[in-house]
Image (tube, helix red, strand yellow):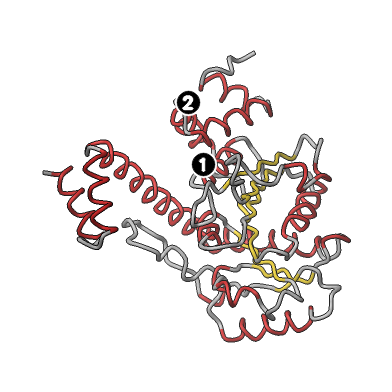
Amino acid sequence: MPDLSTASGLVAALNEGNRRALARVISHIENNDALAQPLLAALYPQAGAAHLIGVTGAPGTGKSTLVNGMALAFRQQGLTVGIVAVDPTSPFSGGALLGDRVRMRDLAGDPGIFIRSMATRGSLGGLAQTTADVVMTLDAAGFARVIIETVGVGQSEVEIASTAHTTIVVEAPGLGDEVQAIKAGILEIADIFAVNKADREGADRTVMALQMMLALGGTGHQQILHHGRMLPVDLPPAPPADGWTPPIHKTVATQNQGIAALVEAIEAHRGYLQHSGLRQTRDRLRAATELRMILRDLLLQRTLAAIPAADIAALVHAVAAREIDPYSAAQRLVARTTS
């Protein structure tokens, strides 16, 4: 039995299919403790085979029930499934507000499914910074499909697009607007649309609104990852823009209606990415984004460690009093670490 108190022992046990070891690895990564970095370094070369599926949309669209049905459909095909459910942080405990088995009880007890709820920890983007590392861990553990479900608020939709190979935007009728994604500004990241709760009045109007927007163009991951300066990266030529038109699927997840067709669309998109070379493009863009994020955090930590807390507090006070603007204050701090 491998020693689960060491990184090498945990990785060995994880590779043997030990789910307890997998849960421990994820906990170390979430806590960013002393074992986190050695674990990530050991697991990273093992990852890259899984197909990553993002599921996002406004609250109330039934995303969790849809993910439940998708996971069951993948299992019927003999595929293993990892699920990362990104939940709002509890203001009292700091942990995920919704529990794993509360959300997806139908999947409990299946050894081919692993579910992890993650807290956003107050991140404005909606995704915890460690989500990408947890997804990579499930990939390295051998899960064929990894589904990432977001809260559906703030910048999380754009973040999920940079994490997933296939992004599903979930809509539902009766939420106030014809298409919630218009308000959220997430139409352009959709590879597939799911109009869930399609047995409700207004479902056909939602489908028609999406069809009209697709006819106008501007969807399909084309504008993601343009937030901030990117690292230079050698990308293969982009495939023709008309190579994939996001399909629209009506589903009633509570009755398992339309789930099979939705899963077929996911697999069709997976094939398209592989044959067009776009999967390689997205993997490289994701690597560049991840590296930029880690670099930013490391530089911030180094800056804060190099400057006395009292000096930082004094600058914060000056910014709050509008004696100095935050950009100039930040430049002063950076100058002190580079001089």
Point out the residue furthest to the left here. Answer: 339
Which is more toward the observer, 193 or 200?
200
- What crowding class fits label 2: few (fewer than 14 Cα within 10 Å), some (14-19), or many (20 or more)? some
SS label for mark 2: loop
164 w.r.t. 129: above or below = below
Say which quarter of the image contains residue 209.
bottom right
Residue 128 place in picture, x, y as percent: 52, 48
Query: Which quarter of the image is occupied by the N terminus?
Result: top right
From the viewer's side, name the closer residue of 54 and 320. 320
Q: Reading the chain from its start, which is encountered first: label 2 or label 1?
A: 2
Judged from the image, the secondary structure of the residue bearing numbered disc 1 is: helix
- In the displayed image of the protein, which residue is found farthest to the front? 321
Q: Position of residue 27 (x, y in %)?
A: 57, 32
Give me the C-alpha separation between circle 2 and circle 1: 13 Å
**Image quadrant for the C terminus?**
top left
Numbered label attached to residue 133 = 1
Residue 274, given in percent of the width and then of the height, sits at 57, 58
Q: Position of residue 197 (x, y in %)?
A: 81, 69
In the displayed orientation, state which residue is furthest to the right: 255
**Residue type, numbered disc 2:** Leu
* Residue visible at 20% across and 59% down in the picture: 328
The reply, left or right, for residue 238 in relation to residue 305 is: right
- Residue drawn at x 48%, y 47% as measured from the top left: 129
Query: Disc number at residue 35?
Result: 2
Q: Tell me which residue sits at (60%, 68%) in the image.
A: 190
> Image height check: is 24 above or below 66?
above
Direction from residue 264 to residue 238 in the image, left or right? left
Q: Does 67 sit left or right of 120 as displayed?
A: right
Dot 1, how many residues are within 10 Å of its Cα: few (below 14), some (14-19), or many (20+)?
Answer: some
Q: Residue at x 24, y 60 (%)?
A: 327
